[in-house]
Image (cartoon, rainbow, N blue to C red):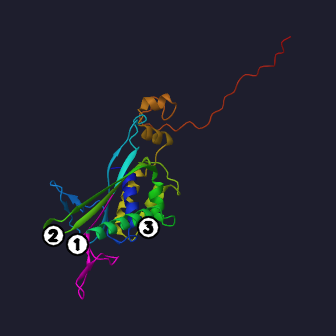
Amino acid sequence: MSLARIALRIAAVEAIKGRTLVGDNVLDSPNGALDVQADGSLRSEEEKPFISIYTDSGKVENVASRQLNENGICDIVFEMGISQAMTDLDRETGVTSLVGIGVPASDRAFEFFLDVVQRQMFDALNDPEDPWAEIYRGLQYGIRKIEYAGARNTDDGQKLAGHQVRITLDLIDDPVRGEVLDDEAPFQKFLKQLEASSDPVYRKQGATIRSLITAEEESWQQIQRRQGMTADELLALGLGPVAGDDERATPEFAQGHLELPHRANVVEE
């Protein structure tokens, strides 16, 4: 899994959290929050309406040289679900209604609830004022397609409805180890958000990711890492250490001076 995918997923979670009818119950890669069984039935272990977010697939084509930091196309999946057990019961009237809406719990009300959550989710991801939403958008070059799917189940009298949104997008490349990130770069903003978080898990994740990309390296080493070049290929470009330098510590050539013998101007008749 690439670092940019991690960033994309966490940014989406934080941008959506507290902005929809599911409240803060926005989950990062949970196991089986909305699970379709082999017989086609739908299951969920969640106790409240939820949104779960995954980055479960991607593809890079026509890779330049031997680069391993390209992310290419990435799928980010949003699943949302609600069941009869996740509704509010008015003990005085005996009426069960949907959380946050107040309409009686029914099949069409479940679909209405999920459609509203989906719209709220999209609004949150494109919020121009939210820093996490800004990071989420900055981590991608554009969207290629959006796919929608729905499922519902009534086994054992337990009504359960779920929606899935799969967004296929062009994800930015991972930063190369040793590369100095610009303060305004989306990935740098992501790391700063993690490091400043009150969540100790986020702070630990931020420190781990920072350690993976921080290194004191020469510029030619970064080029070699980014392109996946061999030492001979690097030397053929006139970069890096000279041939025979076993320690690979030869400083990069920065400046030189060449003196040419004076030649008087010759005027041809």
Which residue is painted at 40% across and 52% down in the image?
4
Whichever of callouts 2 and 3 sits on the residue coming sooner in the sequence is 2
Residue 190 lies, in percent from the top left, at 44, 60
**The magenta stretch spans which residues?**
78-106
Which residue is painted at 15% across and 55% down in the image?
39
Which residue is painted at 73% across and 22% down in the image?
261
Number of numbered callouts drawn: 3
Q: Along the horizontal axis of the image, is 211 left or right of 106?
A: right
Q: Along the horizontal axis of the image, is 48 left or right of 67?
A: left
Q: Between marks 1 and 2, how big is the CA–CA gap?
A: 9 Å
Q: What label does residue 196 carry, if any?
A: 3
Would you say the residues marked 1 and 2 are in contact, meaning their CB atoms lie under 8 Å apart? yes
Residue type at the position of mark 3: Ala
The quarter holding residue 26 reads bottom left
Q: Residues within 10 Å of mark 1 (few under 14, many from 20)?
A: many
Residue 83 lies, in percent from the top left, at 24, 69
Q: Is 92 inside the magenta-drawn segment?
A: yes
Q: Residue furthest left?
A: 156
The quarter holding residue 84 reads bottom left
Along the line of sight, the residue nearer the viewer: 133 or 183? 133
Residue type at the position of mark 2: Gly
Whichever of callouts 3 and 1 sits on the residue coming sooner in the sequence is 1
Along the line of sight, the residue nearer the viewer: 131 or 111? 111
Residue 126 lies, in percent from the top left, at 47, 61
Q: Between marks 2 and 3, how big is the CA–CA gap?
A: 46 Å
Label 1, on which residue? 84
Which residue is painted at 42% across and 32% down in the image?
231
Q: Secondary structure at mark 2?
A: helix
Label 2, on which residue? 157
Q: Secondary structure at mark 3?
A: loop
Along the line of sight, the residue nearer the viewer: 108 or 85? 108
